[in-house]
Image (tube, rainbow, N blue to C red):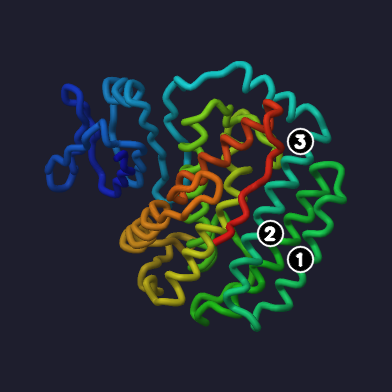
Amino acid sequence: MEKNYYIFSKGRLKREDNTLYFINQDTGKKKYLPIEQVDNIYLFGETDLNTTFLQLLQEYDVRVHFFNYYGFYMGTFYPRSKKVSGFTVVNQCAHYLDKEKRQFIAQSFIHSAVFHMVRNLRHYKPNTASYIDGLVKLAKEIDQTHSIHPLMGIEGNIHQIYYQSFNKFLPDEFAFDTRTKRPPQDPLNALISFGNSLCYTTVLSEIYKTHLDPTVSFLHEPSTKRFSLSLDIAEIFKPLLVDSLIFKLLNKKMLKQSDFRKIDNMILLDDSGRKKFIQAWEDRLSTTVKHRKLNRQVSYRYFMRLECYKLIKHFLGDEVYRPLKAWW
């Protein structure tokens, strides 16, 4: 089974024959990474690598996700795709260029996101009842939009209500006033930003395993410098996976104030906190649910890929896209 590897130490990644190993700069110790079992590598420490290393990643379809000193996602080494379908990409682009078709897909992403937000807040009723009502009311306006700009405005209002509800059920020491991204100004914002980055990169990895082009998106405007389709699909999974995980870690005191540190003018998870979050994230991704149509156990990670397959069927005219709405 393929695994993700997370590297926090300074060092060097090298190729030796047909395998990989990491040399820790401080201890000089080698850690071997069996290439056949590697799906993604996440680099949080300063790491040297060379072209022979990248060539092996290309051969085995391994992605490397880079994070800077502060833990912010910087980019991904993305091997040349072997799952290429010009027919699929042409139809994906056609749906972006058609205003109504693009709007339908973008609206679908937000409908799913709101559904999962409400699902989260229902666990904390009656404290969150008024916020649920606000989300449900705004959700009715989604289908009334006819262009992306007002749709994004509704999405912003939805998130504002959603984030305001957090103080009603999270520990007082993790209360926050507003969503701040770069830089995060408090521990809760730091958690949300870190978790969302992991979600984006996981979605990107699943897109890579399909015929979709990750640069052609629908809710977020396509850009020459980002894989914006991963941002679109992540809207579905951020409340379902990231937010619910944050609520669990904080309410069960699995993460504490001591797992954060202040650097310059921002609050960030320290290495200990990141490792705790990543372990919980990997456990969540591997959790399985009985799929109603496939009639077998499906992991949360694989649900991301299934979402890609549903989009492909929609682009090809085989089946109208219906975004994931957790039934369990």
Residue reaching furthest to the top: 86
**Residue 299 placement, left or right of 312:** left
Q: Which residue is mark 3?
A: 102
Q: Which residue is mark 1?
A: 136
Q: Which residue is mark 2?
A: 114
**Residue 134 placement, left or right of 109:** right
C-beta proximity under 8 Å, tags 2 and 1: yes
The answer to which of marks 3 and 1 sits earlier in the sequence is 3
Q: Secondary structure at mark 3?
A: helix
State how far apart marks 3 and 1 are (Cα).
23 Å
Residue 159, placed above or below residue 300: below
Q: Quadrant of the C terminus?
A: bottom right
Q: Amino acid at mark 2?
A: Val
Q: Quadrant of residue 226?
A: top right
Check disc 1: other Cα within 10 Å, few if <14, some if 14-19, many if 20+.
some
The answer to which of marks 3 and 2 sits earlier in the sequence is 3
Q: Amino acid at mark 3?
A: Arg
Check disc 3: other Cα within 10 Å, few if <14, some if 14-19, many if 20+.
many
Residue under the image location 64 percent in, 30 percent down: 216
